[in-house]
Image (cartoon, helix red, strand yellow):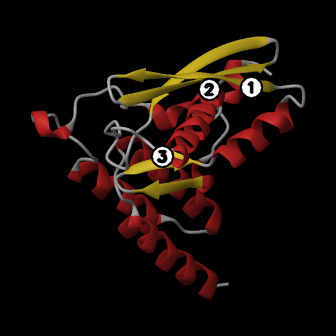
Amino acid sequence: MSFLELRKIDVSENVKKKGQFSYLSWAYACDELLQKDEKATWEFKEPKMFGDTVMVYCSVTAFGVTRNAHLAVMDLKNQAIKNPDAQAVNKAMQRCLTKGIALHGIGLYLYQGEDMPDESDGSPVGISEAVIKLLNNQIDQASNLDELKAAWEIGNKEYLNARQDNTEFKNLVNCKKKDLEGKK
């Protein structure tokens, strides 16, 4: 499979929220990759110290191509942990593996905006009120479950890309789903 094919895979149903960030489970990422290339492999490099923080490294080989990822050992606020313990390093290694898989295309869109400035510098963060209104209108106007599913997929990606909590949107979708199922 090509990068262009792999990047089209929708992983949104398997994304979990921790703190303000969205994560794809390493187990799901590996499962998805191995279904596409059962000969895929990965290798962790020796972690490196930067002062009292640590950087981990992972190389993922799939479809004959090796891609290298690195990741600081971080807390739930994406801040480097000083003097991390083995558990924190292990979690960072698994997140780095997921990032390495994403470099092949699977779930890469989850990392969009990762390199953008923090909201503390005044940069806009989240989905605009106009987009939220448009998404909610799409849900409200859905006349069947297929239209609802399509609106959900679009909206969920918007919320994931903006790294914004989608609880209210999810509740709206679930209410509309119950309503549509009741009309059958």
Q: Identify whether 48 is placed above or below 79.
A: above
The local secondary structure at tag 2 comes to helix
Q: In the displayed structure, does residue 65 sit left or right of residue 163? A: right
Residue where numbered disc 2 is placed:
100
Q: Which residue is mark 3?
A: 157
Sequence-first tag of 1 and 2? 1
Please state which amino acid type lies under the numbered disc 3. Answer: Lys
- Rendered residue at 60%/21% (across/down): 46
Q: Which residue type does callout 1 highlight?
A: Trp
The answer to the question of whether label 1 and label 2 lie on touching residues, with beta carbons closer than 8 A, is yes
Q: Horizontal placement of 86 versus 163: left or right?
A: right
- Near mark 1 (Cα within 10 A), the count class, few <14, some 14-19 or many ≥20, is some
Residue at 72 percent across and 26 percent down: it is 5
Could you say where residue 165 lies in the image, as x and y percent from the top left?
36, 58
Question: As shown in the figure, which amino acid type bears the numbered disc 2?
Answer: Gly
Label 3 secondary element: helix
- Name the disc covering residue 144, or none: none
Image-quadrant location for residue 95 = top right
Q: Is residue 183 visible?
A: no
x 83%, y 32%: residue: 36
Q: How many marks?
A: 3
Give the spatial CA distance, label 1 vs label 2.
9 Å
Q: Distance from label 2 to label 3 (Cα)?
A: 21 Å
Nearer to us of marks 1 and 2 is 1
For disc 2, the neighbor class at 10 Å (few under 14, some 14 to 19, many from 20) is: many
Circles 3 and 1: CB distance less than 8 Å?
Answer: no
In whole angstroms, how far apart are the C-alphas of marks 3 and 1?
Answer: 28 Å
Percent across and percent down for residue 79 are 31, 39
Q: Who comes first in sequence, dot 3 or dot 1? A: 1
Mark 1 — residue?
42
